Image (cartoon, rainbow, N blue to C red):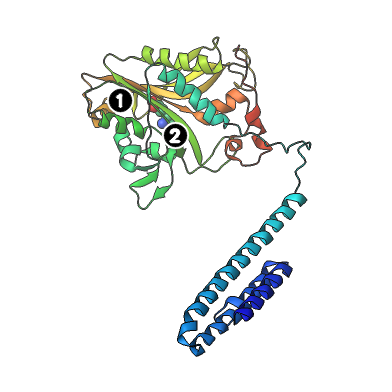
């Protein structure tokens, strides 16, 4: 019996040595080590052996199984190693080849401009706040002095969600009242809120169903139009250059009284008249005004004690002017060729 085991062991070792791949190795493994394999069959002899021999034969069998299992494992490792080595040899990396150039992304110009305005105003003590894009009719219109049925709603038709009470905000002005309500009517406020806004407009070079506004609100005591003018002046000088002048024209918004239209002197022709300023020498960049007493009241502020100013810039308009972009759809286009505009140099002011 001993001899039989010895010969079997030699045979297995020899066969394993000859195997070249994993598939054949597995076939071989099944041949010897599976339940019905040759080693398994040897176990059936156990029954027939006299008691004294059973023990030593059993031990020999176990030893054989262990040894053979090890042989198989070792061979498997060898095969895997050989595959890997072959792969490594064939995939030699030529480090002298020039690397493929990976293009670096650039921040969207709109984003850059918003950050620039944020940083000017933050340096003046303003907080940057956020508001929901899905807004309630109450905040987008009613609290801003624009009741249901008011004609001013026509120009701000938007997308309604669920029912008439929820909409995609048509302006960032609702954040004014939201901020006031959070401040409990007893603290001064200085905030800006840049964010997406929506209107039911057909997209063209100067209109988009989605665009961005930058809202500003200050509430404090004894606030006047000159505070507003001084603040806006600083922002536009920072954006367009120190020589830029600001002027206010009377206007009408439901949530400010008085209301103004903010014009800046044309940075292109310096006021002489050109295509950008439509020969007027001035460019309109924002709506603004002194916060209407009703709006202060809706925000929980007593208009006899507090006063404030508000302004709203159109971010696309500012960026189009600053970077000489002719079509506002460019900001949202995924075409990398068009996005080359984002590589545009910072215009030199003055
Ligand atoms: N929300 C106005 C609009 O979308 C812009 C605006 C005008 C905002 C006057 C203001 C403001 O805060 O005071 O047309």
Q: Residue furthest bottom?
A: 48
Tell me the quarter of the image containing the C terminus. Answer: top right
Which label sits on residue 325? none
Task: Judge by depth and name the residue closer to the eye, 133 or 57.
Answer: 57
Mark 2 burial class by Cα count in 10 Å: few <14, some 14-19, many 20+: many
Who's the residue at 66% across and 39% down the image?
336
Q: Is residue 249 visible?
A: no
Which residue is most to the front? 52
Residue at position x 64%, y 18% in the image: 274
Q: Which residue is mark 2?
A: 195
- Ligand 1, what quadrant? top left
Instruction: Report helix, strand or loop for mark 2.
Output: strand
> Farthest residue in the top direction?
243
Q: Distance of mark 1 from mark 2, alpha carbons?
A: 23 Å
Quarter of the image with the N terminus is bottom right
Q: Is mark 1 within 8 Å of ligand 1?
A: no
Q: Is residue 275 above or below residue 330?
A: above
Q: In this view of the protein, which residue sits in the foreground, 74 or 178?
A: 74
Judge by depth and name the residue closer to the eye, 5 or 303: 5
Q: Earlier in the sequence, mark 1 or mark 2?
A: 2
Horizontal and vertical percent for residue 82? 71, 57
Say whether residue 117 is left or right of residue 34.
left
Q: Position of residue 66 (x, y in %)?
A: 55, 69
Residue identified by numbered label 1: 292
Numbered label tally: 2
User: Residue 157 appears at what percent x and percent y?
Assistant: 43, 42
Quadrant position of residue 317: top right
Residue sitting at x 26%, y 31%: 182
């Amino acid at each position: 019996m001993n001899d039989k085991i010895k010969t079997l062991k030699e045979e297995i070792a020899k066969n394993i040595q000859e195997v070249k791949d994993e598939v054949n190795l597995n076939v071989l493994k099944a041949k010897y080590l599976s339940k019905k394999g040759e080693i398994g069959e040897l176990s059936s002899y156990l029954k027939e052996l006299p008691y004294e021999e059973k023990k030593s034969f059993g031990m020999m069998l176990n030893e054989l199984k262990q040894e053979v299992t090890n042989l198989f494992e070792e061979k498997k490792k060898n095969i895997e190693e050989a595959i890997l080595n072959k792969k490594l040899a064939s995939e030699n990396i030529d480090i002298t080849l020039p690397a493929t150039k990976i293009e670096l992304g650039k921040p969207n110009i709109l984003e850059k401009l918003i950050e620039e305005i944020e940083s000017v105003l933050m340096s003046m003590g303003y907080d940057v706040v956020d508001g929901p894009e899905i807004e309630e009719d109450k905040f987008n219109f009613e609290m801003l002095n624009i009741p249901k049925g008011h004609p001013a709603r026509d120009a701000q038709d938007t997308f309604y969600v669920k029912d008439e009470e929820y909409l995609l905000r048509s302006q960032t002005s609702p954040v004014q009242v939201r901020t006031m309500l959070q401040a409990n009517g007893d603290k001064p406020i200085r905030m800006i809120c840049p964010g997406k806004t929506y209107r039911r407009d057909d997209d063209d070079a100067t209109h988009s169903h989605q665009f961005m506004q930058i809202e500003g609100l200050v509430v404090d005591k004894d606030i006047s139009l000159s505070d507003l003018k001084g603040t806006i002046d600083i922002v536009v000088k920072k954006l367009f250059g120190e020589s830029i002048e600001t002027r206010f024209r009377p206007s009408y918004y439901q949530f400010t009284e008085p209301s103004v239209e903010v014009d800046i002197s044309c940075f292109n022709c310096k006021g002489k008249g050109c295509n950008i300023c439509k020969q007027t020498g001035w460019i309109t960049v924002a709506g603004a005004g002194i916060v209407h007493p009703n709006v202060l009241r809706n925000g929980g502020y007593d208009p006899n004690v507090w006063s404030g100013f508000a302004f709203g810039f159109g971010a696309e308009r500012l960026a189009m002017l600053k970077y000489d972009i002719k079509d506002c759809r460019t900001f949202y286009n995924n075409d990398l060729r068009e996005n080359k505009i984002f590589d545009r140099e910072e215009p030199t002011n003055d």
